């Protein structure tokens, strides 16, 4: 049996994610939506999948070319030249020479579903079928009605809960006879009536309401699916299909602070409850920050004011790495471009933080920065002092927006000295937490890192080989997740949603969305 995936639309409601890629290439659990479907068809033993392209067809073609090497199923491309002015019925019309009058399975290219859905449709061999979820009713979704014999009598968004027999997940199986009847209706609507902006479900409804068909529902009970039209749907899919298990089964979870647990003095909603639930489940909780402007007791007090109990020993800062390096290398005299709190922490370790002839210059996140500090640091480095940077973050998330951070200050010094730092501490250096893993005996498989920066928090997790959660409450955007080299195990709006129930798929299909498929 062949299959058809309709993937021609512009996905306008998912902008800006679809500005530089088609919706079918948007990723869920680091895998493009179309790839989820193609792998499901391949696993079910389909012979050929016809992918109808349109918007940014070259991106889908590149994806299919890559998968054609990895999969057994043949992938054939069909291009809808007028995708911008038509809907998915016309895209299916473009595939008529390939499947009209032949049995085939059809799926809209914006749905992620478990392979079990395809397996159940493929197992049907004596009638046509619509895959439905009988456990869900969504006012905006396509629903079906059935007669007393179980045959489908209609498919529409308009059916009330009292009469709807299930919600369509936009996956269909057509027998050869029904395929011929369906394309007869599609060709009449397009070639005779000129209906270029209609969706396929109208032709299917016309077919099933006539009574002359073999279309029955196939319940996908127990199989997950999400149709992705807008940001909320994508985040629901991220959660539903995440490779990350329950955080409460972990041995330890490391939380970034700035942009993850709080913004400035404002806690992220639900952060305290998440920490409490993890601890109640026996999970050890630690807090990570590259922010070197404060020392551990201050962070502990700040967390306590937000309802989160934290021992200073549970807080790991980039300054820890700096101090360890200075001690290990026997440094007694340094010049710290940092706050008074950072200088006091260095001094408490037995190292002079404002030496006139320093062996090292340390640049931190200095919210008390002065020109005199920069001048002293520049002169010392030019005279031979080693150049060290507490961490590389160029911006710090605040309630007002992103402001210059340690990396930006270090860049100024680097420009003034024409010298690159010999060491940059903090995240994403694995040394930030490796000593804790070794001390406590944690396996990387039982550790997760939660943070708002792909280049530091998620990169740290990848260097350690552990699970990760990217939150969108700080620096990272969902669009950045699409293009970054790092691949988080889960993406959520904020930490407060870590234990929220998965959102129901919010399928919506209307004339206004005529270029989405």
Image: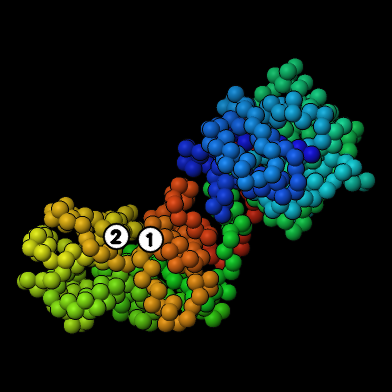
Residue placed farthest to the top in the image? 192
Whether residue 148 sits left or right of residue 22 in the image: it is right
Residue placed farthest to the right in the image? 149
Whether residue 171 sits left or right of residue 510 in the image: it is right
Asked whether residue 265 appears in the rendered view, the answer is no
Asked whether residue 463 appears in the rendered view, the answer is yes
- Judge by depth and name the residue closer to the eye, 430 or 225: 430
Q: Position of residue 293 (x, y in %)?
A: 25, 69
What residue does disc 2 label?
392
Residue at left offset 53%, top offset 33% = 58
Residue at left offset 9%, top offset 60% = 382
**Quarter of the image where the N terminus is located:** top right
Q: Position of residue 222 (x, y in %)?
A: 74, 59
Asked if the residue at tag 1 contacts the one at tag 2, i.e. Cβ–Cβ closer than 8 Å, the answer is: yes
**SS class of the residue under badge 1?**
helix
Distance from label 2 to label 1 (Cα)?
A: 9 Å
Q: Is residue 439 above or below residue 492?
A: below
Q: Answer with the quarter of the image where residue 459 lies.
A: bottom left
| Marks 2 and 1, the one that precedes in the sequence | 2
What residue does disc 1 label?
456
């Amino acid at each position: 049996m062949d299959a058809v995936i309709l993937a021609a639309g512009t996905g306008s409601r998912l902008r800006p994610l679809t500005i530089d890629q088609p919706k079918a290439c948007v990723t869920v659990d680091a895998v493009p939506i179309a790839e989820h479907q193609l792998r499901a068809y391949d696993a079910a033993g389909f012979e050929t999948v016809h992918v109808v392209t349109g918007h940014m067809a070259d991106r889908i073609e590149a994806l299919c070319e890559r998968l054609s090497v990895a999969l057994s199923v043949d992938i054939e491309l069909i291009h809808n030249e007028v995708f911008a002015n038509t809907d998915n019925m016309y895209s299916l019309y473009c595939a008529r020479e390939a499947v009209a009058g032949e049995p085939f399975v059809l799926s809209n290219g914006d749905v992620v579903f478990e392979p079990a859905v395809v397996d159940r449709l493929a197992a049907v061999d004596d009638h046509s079928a619509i895959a439905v979820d009988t456990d869900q009713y969504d006012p905006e979704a396509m629903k079906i009605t059935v007669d007393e014999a179980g045959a489908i009598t209609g498919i529409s968004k308009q059916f009330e809960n009292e009469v709807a027999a299930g919600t369509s997940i936009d996956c269909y199986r057509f027998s050869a006879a029904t395929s011929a009847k369906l394309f007869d209706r599609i060709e009449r609507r397009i070639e005779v009536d000129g209906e270029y902006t209609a969706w396929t479900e109208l032709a299917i409804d016309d077919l099933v309401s006539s009574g002359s068909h073999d279309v029955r529902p196939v319940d996908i009970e127990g199989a997950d699916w999400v149709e992705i039209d807008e940001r909320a749907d994508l985040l629901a899919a991220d959660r539903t299909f995440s490779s990350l298990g329950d955080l409460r089964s972990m041995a330890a979870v490391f939380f970034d602070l700035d942009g993850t647990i709080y913004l400035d003095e404002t806690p992220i909603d639900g952060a305290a409850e998440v920490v409490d639930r993890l601890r109640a489940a026996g999970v050890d909780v630690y807090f990570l920050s590259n922010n070197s402007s404060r020392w551990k007791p201050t962070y502990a007090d700040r967390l306590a004011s937000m309802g989160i109990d934290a021992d200073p020993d549970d807080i790991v800062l980039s300054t820890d790495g700096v101090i360890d390096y200075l001690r290990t290398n026997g440094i007694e005299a340094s010049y710290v471009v940092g706050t008074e709190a950072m200088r006091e922490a260095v001094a408490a370790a037995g190292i002079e933080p404002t030496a006139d002839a320093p062996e090292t210059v340390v640049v931190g996140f200095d919210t008390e920065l002065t020109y005199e500090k920069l001048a002293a640091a520049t002169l010392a480095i030019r005279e031979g002092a080693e150049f060290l940077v507490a961490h590389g973050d160029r911006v710090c998330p605040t309630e007002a927006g992103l402001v210059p951070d340690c990396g930006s200050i270090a860049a100024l010094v680097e420009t003034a000295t024409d010298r690159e730092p010999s060491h940059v501490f903090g995240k994403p250096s694995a040394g930030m937490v490796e000593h804790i893993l070794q001390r406590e005996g944690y396996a990387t498989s039982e550790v997760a890192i939660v943070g708002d920066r792909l280049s530091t928090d998620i990169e740290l997790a990848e260097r350690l080989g552990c699970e990760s959660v990217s939150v969108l409450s700080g620096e990272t955007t969902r669009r950045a997740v699409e293009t970054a080299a790092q691949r988080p195990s889960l993406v959520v709006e904020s930490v407060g949603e870590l234990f929220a129930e998965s959102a129901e798929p919010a399928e919506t299909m209307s004339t206004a969305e005529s270029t989405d498929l």
